[in-house]
Image (cartoon, coloured by chain):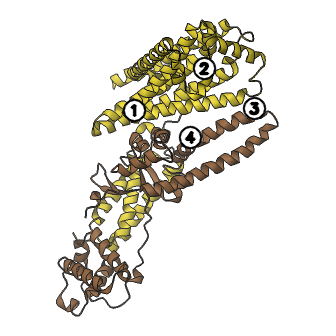
Chain colours: A brown, B yellow
Amino acid sequence: MNAAELTNIVEIRTPEGISFPLHLASPVSRCLAWTMDFFCILVLQNALSMIVRLFLILSPDFAQGMAIALYFVISILYGIILEWAWNGQTFGKRMFCLRVIDADGMKLSPSQVVVRNLLRAVDCLPAFYLAGGAFSLLSPRYQRLGDIAGRTYVIRELKAADPDLNSILTDKYNSFRNYPYLMARARAGIPPNEATLLLRSLLRRDTLDAQRRAEIYSKLAEYVKEKALFPQEATDGLSDERYLKNIVDILYRR
Amino acid sequence: MILDIEKFVVKEKPLWNELDNLLGTLAREGDKKLSVDDVKRLYYLYERVSEDLAKISTFSGEREVRKYLETLVARAYAEIYAKKGKRVKFNLFKWAAHSFPAAFRRNSKAFMLACAISLFGALFGGIAVTVDPDAKKAVFPEEFRHLQQSPDERVAQEEKMDADRRLEGVQSTFAAQLMTHNIKVSVFCLALGMAWGIGTMLVLFYNGVVLGAVAFDFIMGGQTVFMLGWLMPHGVIEIPAFVIAGQAGLVLGGCILKPRGARARALKEKIDDIVTLAGGVAMLLIWAGLVESFLSQLHEPVIPYFAKIILGVVELIALIAYLGLAGRKKEKEAMSKGAAE
């Protein structure tokens, strides 16, 4: 269960040998963000048409010409200006917590922003971003043509929210807490992805039927017991579910 | 290794906060206000937080702390390893006087290829309408339906329309339509470079066919002077602009054609040139749109054809001089500086 094996994660390795994951945005969330941006462009264009109407008094021809030019400029520059000013975000991307980043994890350069936005000309072919959508579905990094040319990824910005541990853990006595040294060993022995798996299995408790739940918890407990060694008096009389809750309690609660 | 996580977090948290604040200042105000000591401190904090991340990565329960540190390291990494040249302030005058012509010259082979494809298309279009006048229907798109008339009819109609002052009161609208349409077509031509350059080649060839068909049709119909007077004032800028858009598309296609690793390097190297060429094309097309709307559509007796042809020749010489010579001095200085280093 290495994070790097999952297709929606790009792992960036720094020259210092540290790696950090970037979570790629799915084509669906990108489509939603684009829809939001499309409406933003429409609103801007409508607001602009009201301003341009003021010039009708001076010259209807000039007002009309300006309207055509400005509509065009807004539709092209909306993405370019916002992604540059907001470091890879537009209104839509902000709303859906997405961000465009350089493929090496660096800050975007102005040229990358311009190229990925200019290439919307082919991504939107033949209509409704079908070409771009198809490419991002087929691409291992969910890249549309503009992203490939600009060497960019669109990532999901994860908000680090604490899981609702209170819904699954109670303040019931946890016999494992009598063994601080073994607790520390368990914390070091169970890797983060496995801890997340245990937590999720408990959070989803009520969605599993009783028999299936018992089978899953039994297998998980059996696996964890090999890694978290506690004396028999600490584990005696604990059901598999209670055992897993105690483990998650020591992993997630200080 | 067994780590006392609580002590660890309490000890390291002030450093994490300091890096977070420093990165926030950088994002808001840029790096202008950073002293050398600040930069050293930033790098120290980045290394320290990276170490913390490495230490905590093996700890299962500290998922949130790990995520927080990952975000912090990612932000610091992006700031510290960002390219040096990226923060140069954009100067429109310098860009127009130096960057655009220099980018054009750096990619002259792609321009030559784009020219050759366009000329081949023009020759094909010219021969097609000369051999078979009915080919005009197939060659000219719907928006150029008026070109299906005979050149004599077209000239008579244009000169009469001038007398009727047909564009009076709609010139700004017409100019805006021309600019936006031409820029859209150019961007499309550039973007099709993503199809290994084949899309760009097809667009260049097709534009050449239309242009060649129009030119040969008017020449064969004995209306060479009208055609030159009509096309040259804007065409000497507009046509090279399309070819330069094709040049940018071919540069892009050239990068895409390379194998995976080399492709990424090539794109990284050429992306600035592609954007500069696209910006230059837009600049040229704005000029061409204004000239086409306010001047090219005026014919004799309003403006004599020779005056329009002379203007076209002057523009063409200016364009060649601009693309061929502008910014050469700076380019030489940069090259000698690079060689010295």
A88 and B172: which is toward the camera: B172
Q: CA distance from mark 2 to mark 3?
A: 26 Å
What's the residue at 29%, 68% (across, down)? A193
Residue B104 horizontal/vertical position (percent): 45, 23
Q: Which mark is nearer the camera, 2 or 3? A: 2
Residue behind mark 2: B147
Q: The residue marked by circle 3 belongs to what chain? A: A
Query: Are the residues at dot 4 and dot 1 in contact (C-beta closer than 8 Å)?
Result: no
> Dots 2 and 1: beta carbons under 8 Å?
no
Q: Which of the 4 image quarters holds residue A168?
A: bottom left
Residue at 34% across, 23% down: B340
Mark found first going from the N terminus, 2 or 1: 2
| Label 1: which secondary element | helix
Q: Chain of mark 4?
A: A
Q: Nearer the viewer, residue B144 or B26?
A: B144
Q: Secondary structure at mark 3?
A: helix
Give the alpha-carbon distance from disc 4 to disc 3, as whole Å: 23 Å
Instruction: Classify 10 Å Cα crowding around label 2: few (below 14), some (14-19), many (20 and above).
Output: some
Q: Which residue is mark 4?
A: A76
Identified by mark 1, the residue type is Leu
Q: CA distance from mark 4 to mark 1?
A: 20 Å
- Give the distance between the C-alpha atoms of the residues marked 2 and 1, in whole angstroms: 34 Å
Which of the two discs, 4 and 3, labels the residue nearer the N terminus? 3
Tag 1 and tag 3, C-beta contact below 8 Å: no
Q: Residue at x 32, y 61 (%)?
A: B53
